[in-house]
Image (cartoon, rainbow, N blue to C red):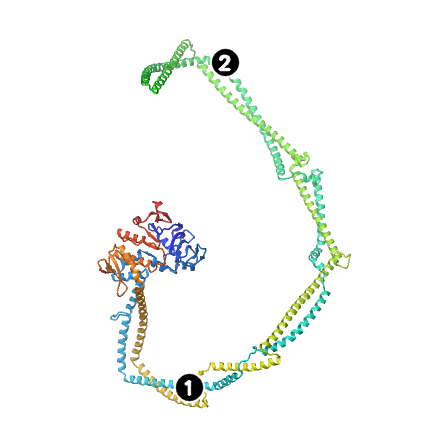
């Protein structure tokens, strides 16, 4: 069996983990707590069931998931591929096995796949870990051999443990030369008490004499009892013979009579059957005639009570109609109510029309659009009209306030304008006051202009020098490049290399173009013009300074300052006036907007009033109320129409009832022209009569069918009886009934004799005397006399026994007095108690001794039958692991240990080997056990870090050995990274907490 893949739903820290494409040699690598032990436990759990709460094994219930369990896909050599799924359920989980062939099963199918292996045996043979090796480390020298032998037998140390436990139990109870074991102590105590008992008995010789006498009397009484028992048995047999003697003699006579009759061919119970047939045939014949007459009478009755089928066929329609007759009055009342309601609705409609001043009919009212949109429009127009009226009042109030404010501001502006200087007066003052200001400005401008002229002069001189130097450099460069390109032209002409010639010509043209472009006018021409302009401006400023006149302007400046203040105030008032004008215009604009909105609302109101067909003067003030009246009118019209429809239905229903009832009256009643209720009453009675006729007719038909069936049955039975009568005569080979009865009498006599013989034999069956002794008792003529003689002899023996019993009781009483009178009784009681305790302990010792004997016999059988084949394979593995240093493994001649032979033929016991060699021997035996004795069970071998104590060479050898095991899949779990170098990367899976990764990708 090979595990192909695993899907862990939830097991310990592993949740929803899938492991696919497991190799024949699969390595699981991970640090501690990465999940190696969890995967091993998962494999054991899926195959053999989850551990229960009562077991000590970890259950690995997931902490963060409700799913518990998973599934494993395997390949079985005999049954093919299968999926084993086990989830949370009963104690060990619910298991489901699905074969690729389509077979589905549970635990029974799984046991079949696993060869009835249980978890313990599987772990012992195919799953081993460091624990087995650690057991070797902890053992004493003499225990190692037994442990290895046990591992070779069962895969674990259980056999060794069982043998050790049995030996300890035996030694704790008894040792031949021991003192402390329980049996030794109790034997010694019993021996001491027996000595004390003998000493106490020696002191009382009379007691021993009485004991001897008592024993003799007991023997004599037993002999008499035996004689009495034999005598009683003899008397009992004689009584039994007395009881069965007439029966035995009658049996012999009956057998003699039966022998004279011989064998007679006659039907069983022939006479009885013939008489029964004769008794049945005549009544059957008379009954057949009687049934025929009754059938004719029933046919006549059926003709007389034939029902009206046409009426019955219309029964459901008639009953439905009759059920509707009582509601005629109800329909009349309902009609009156509806007519009253119609009058009320007419009054309401008239009132509504008066309020609306409309003369619209029903069709016109329903033609008016009163849907949700129109209702919303009416509400919007009404609300807007109300809002426009409120806005108008607010605007009129604001208009008055803003107009008053505007008039006050205009008055202030006119006063401020009268206080400000005229334009001509202000210009004159400004000219007079501006002269001093111009002189200061001209002096400042002149100084600034002179500084600017100096700066421009210096910059002009620097630019002029730089341009001259750059011009010289460019000219030198152009001449150098022209010389080079002329050289290329000359070289190209001389060597006739036209490419060089073309390159030289193009270079000369390019240089010439650059030289032409570089001969642009210098940019400092503009700077020169700017400098000349500045100098002319300087000349004009100097002329203005020389021609200016100077006045005292303090008074003028004060006037101008006062005028400036008044102008600022005027400007502020004008701005305020402007703002007020703007505010006033806004109010006016809002009035205009209000008028537009009011006109639009009136237009919309007019449109709605036209659509609703109501007058404009009503719409102007009561649009919403008018709309509600129209809606109310529609509602009243609807209800009125519904009432009219219902009235039509009521009239139609009443007419239909009357019409149908009249129709049925004409068809089925003899009376005509009756009122509604009488007609209904007579129809109901007619139905009842016809029903009664139908019931009677059906009863008669049922009886007729029964009689016909009886007639048929009786005729058939009569025919069968007549056939059986003829068969009886033929079976007895008789021609007439008289001959048949005569033969029957002879058969009856013979049957009585046989019956009597059976009764006699039945009585003799439980007799105390067996049949073979009856002949010996037949010669006895008077059994009563023999019984009397035996009773007399028994009385004599009983009298003698009574005398002996009285004497025995007297001696027992004397012994009791002696025992109660001293220490002897206590010692005797103590002796018997200790003897009982010794016997119980000896029983326990014998149980353990027997168990040890059975175990030793089992070990001997295993050593002689199964072990040699396993040891041969273990020697092969041991030789490979030790490079031939140890070649043979021998059994101990006695016991259950091994001797290991080195290549120099030196023998070692297991405890004499080094620790590492002992572990190699353990591994060899375990692997040999799996591959030989259990070779037909090709289960995966699961190994959990069992070689961590090996050095590098030993580790390499044991892994190489595992790789050679081709028949079994190897699942190798390790937390040591240095072991991974021995395996191919694609065969390694890396375990991290909660996940399984490919080792190659991870690295």
Quadrant holding the N terminus? bottom left
Q: Is residue 157 visible?
A: no
Q: Residue at x 55, y 21 (%)?
A: 411
Count of all numbered marks drawn on residues in the image: 2
Q: Which residue is mark 2?
A: 425
In this rendering, is residue 227 above or below 663?
Answer: below
Q: Is residue 179 left or right of residue 552?
A: left
Q: Which mark is residue 931?
A: none
Q: CA distance from mark 1 to mark 2?
A: 188 Å
Q: Is residue 586 left or right of residue 33?
A: right
| Element type at mark 1 | helix
Quarter of the figure with residue 776 = bottom left
Instruction: Please tell me which residue lies in front, 166 or 914.
Output: 914
Q: Circle 1 sits on which residue?
A: 234
Vertical order, 768 against 563 (above or below): below
Element at label 2: helix
Can see residue 417?
A: yes
User: Residue 517 placed where, x, y %?
Assistant: 38, 16
């Amino acid at each position: 069996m090979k595990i192909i893949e695993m899907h862990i739903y939830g097991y310990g820290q592993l949740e929803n983990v899938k492991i696919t494409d497991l190799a024949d040699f699969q390595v699981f690598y991970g640090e501690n707590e990465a999940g190696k032990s969890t995967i091993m436990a998962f494999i054991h759990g899926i195959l053999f069931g989850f551990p229960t709460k009562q077991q000590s094994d970890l259950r690995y219930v997931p902490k963060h998931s409700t799913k518990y369990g998973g599934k494993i896909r395997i390949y079985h050599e005999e049954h093919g591929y299968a999926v084993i799924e086990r989830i949370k359920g009963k104690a060990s989980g619910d298991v489901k096995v699905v074969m690729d062939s389509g077979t589905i099963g549970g635990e029974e199918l799984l046991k079949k796949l696993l060869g009835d292996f249980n978890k313990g045996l599987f772990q012992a043979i195919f799953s081993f870990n460091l624990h087995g090796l650690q057991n070797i480390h902890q053992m004493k020298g003499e225990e190692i051999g037994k442990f290895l032998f046990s591992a070779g037998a069962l895969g674990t140390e259980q056999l060794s443990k069982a043998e050790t436990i049995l030996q300890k139990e035996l030694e704790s109870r008894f040792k031949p030369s021991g003192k402390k074991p329980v049996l030794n102590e109790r034997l010694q105590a019993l021996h001491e008490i027996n000595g004390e008992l003998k000493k106490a008995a020696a002191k009382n010789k009379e007691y021993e004499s009485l004991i001897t006498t008592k024993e003799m009397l007991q023997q004599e009484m037993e002999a008499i009892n035996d004689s009495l028992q034999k005598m009683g048995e003899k008397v009992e047999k004689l009584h039994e013979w007395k009881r069965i003697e007439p029966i035995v003699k009658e049996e012999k006579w009956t057998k003699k009579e039966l022998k004279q009759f011989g064998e007679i061919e006659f039907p069983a119970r022939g006479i009885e059957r013939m008489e029964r047939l004769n008794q049945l045939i005549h009544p059957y014949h008379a009954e057949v005639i009687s049934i025929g007459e009754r059938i004719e009478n029933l046919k006549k009755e059926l003709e007389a009570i034939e029902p009206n089928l046409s009426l019955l066929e219309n029964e459901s329609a008639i009953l439905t109609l009759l059920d509707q007759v009582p509601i005629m009055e109800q329909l009349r009342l309902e009609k009156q109510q509806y007519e009253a309601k119609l009058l009320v609705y007419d009054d309401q409609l008239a009132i509504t029309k008066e309020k609306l001043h409309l003369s619209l009919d029903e069709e016109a009212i329903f033609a008016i659009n009163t849907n949700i949109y129109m209702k919303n429009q009416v509400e919007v127009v009404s609300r807007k009209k109300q809002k426009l009226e409120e806005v108008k009042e607010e605007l009129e109030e604001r208009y008055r306030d803003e107009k008053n404010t505007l008039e006050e501001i205009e008055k202030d502006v006119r006063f401020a304008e009268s206080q400000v200087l005229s334009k001509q007066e202000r210009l004159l003052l400004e000219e007079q006051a501006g002269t001093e200001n111009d002189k200061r400005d001209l002096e400042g401008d002149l100084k600034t202009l002179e500084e600017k002229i100096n700066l421009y002069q210096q910059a002009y001189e620097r630019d002029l020098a730089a341009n001259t130097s750059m011009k010289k450099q460019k000219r030198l460069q152009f001449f150098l490049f022209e010389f080079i390109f002329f050289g290329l032209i000359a070289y190209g002409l001389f060597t006739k290399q036209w490419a060089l010639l073309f390159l030289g010509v193009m270079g000369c043209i390019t240089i010439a173009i650059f030289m032409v472009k570089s001969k642009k006018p210098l940019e400092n021409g503009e700077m020169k013009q700017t400098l000349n302009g500045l100098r002319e401006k300087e000349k004009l400023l100097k002329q203005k300074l020389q021609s200016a006149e100077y006045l005292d302007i303090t008074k003028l400046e004060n006037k101008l300052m006062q005028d400036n203040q008044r102008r600022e105030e005027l400007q502020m008032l004008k701005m305020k006036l402007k703002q007020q004008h703007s505010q006033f215009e806004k109010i006016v604009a809002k009035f205009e907007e209000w008028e537009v909105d009011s006109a639009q609302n009136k237009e919309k109101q007019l449109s709605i009033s036209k659509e609703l067909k109501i007058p404009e003067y009503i719409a102007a003030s009561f649009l919403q109320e008018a709309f509600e009246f129209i809606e109310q009118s529609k509602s009243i019209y609807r209800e009125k129409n519904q009432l009219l429809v219902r009235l039509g239905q009521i009239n139609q229903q009443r007419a239909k009832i009357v019409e149908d009832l009249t129709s049925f009256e004409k068809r089925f009643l003899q009376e005509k022209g009756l009122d509604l209720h009488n007609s209904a009453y007579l129809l109901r009675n007619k139905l009842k009569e016809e029903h009664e006729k139908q019931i009677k007719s059906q009863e008669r038909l049922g009886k007729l069918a029964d009689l016909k069936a009886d007639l048929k049955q009786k005729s058939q039975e009569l025919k069968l009886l007549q056939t059986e009568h003829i068969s009886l005569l033929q079976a007895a080979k008789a021609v007439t009934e008289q001959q048949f009865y005569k033969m029957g009498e002879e058969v009856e006599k013979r049957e009585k004799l046989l019956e009597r013989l059976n009764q006699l034999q039945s009585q003799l069956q439980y007799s105390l005397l067996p049949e073979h002794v009856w002949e010996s008792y037949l010669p006895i003529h008077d059994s009563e006399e023999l019984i009397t003689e035996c009773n007399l002899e028994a009385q004599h023996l009983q009298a003698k026994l009574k005398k002996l019993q009285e004497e025995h009781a007297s001696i027992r009483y004397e012994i009791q007095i002696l025992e109660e009178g001293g220490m002897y009784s206590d010692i005797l009681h103590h002796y018997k108690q200790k003897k009982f305790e010794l016997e119980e302990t000896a029983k326990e010792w014998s149980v353990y001794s027997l168990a040890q004997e059975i175990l030793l016999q089992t070990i001997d059988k295993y050593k002689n039958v199964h072990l040699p084949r396993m040891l041969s394979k273990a020697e092969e593995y041991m030789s490979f692991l030790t490079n031939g240093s140890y070649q043979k493994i021998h059994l101990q001649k006695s016991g259950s240990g091994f001797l290991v032979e080195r290549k120099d033929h030196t023998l070692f016991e297991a405890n004499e080997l080094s620790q590492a060699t002992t572990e190699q021997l353990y591994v060899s035996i375990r692997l040999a056990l799996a591959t030989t004795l259990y070779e037909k069970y090709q289960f995966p071998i699961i190994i959990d870090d069992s070689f961590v104590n090996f050095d590098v060479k030993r580790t390499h050898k044991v892994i190489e050995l595992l790789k050679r095991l081709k028949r079994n899949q190897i699942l190798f779990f390790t937390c040591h990274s240095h072991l991974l170098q021995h395996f191919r990367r694609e065969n390694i899976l890396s375990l991290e907490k909660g996940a399984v990764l490919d080792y190659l990708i991870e690295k």
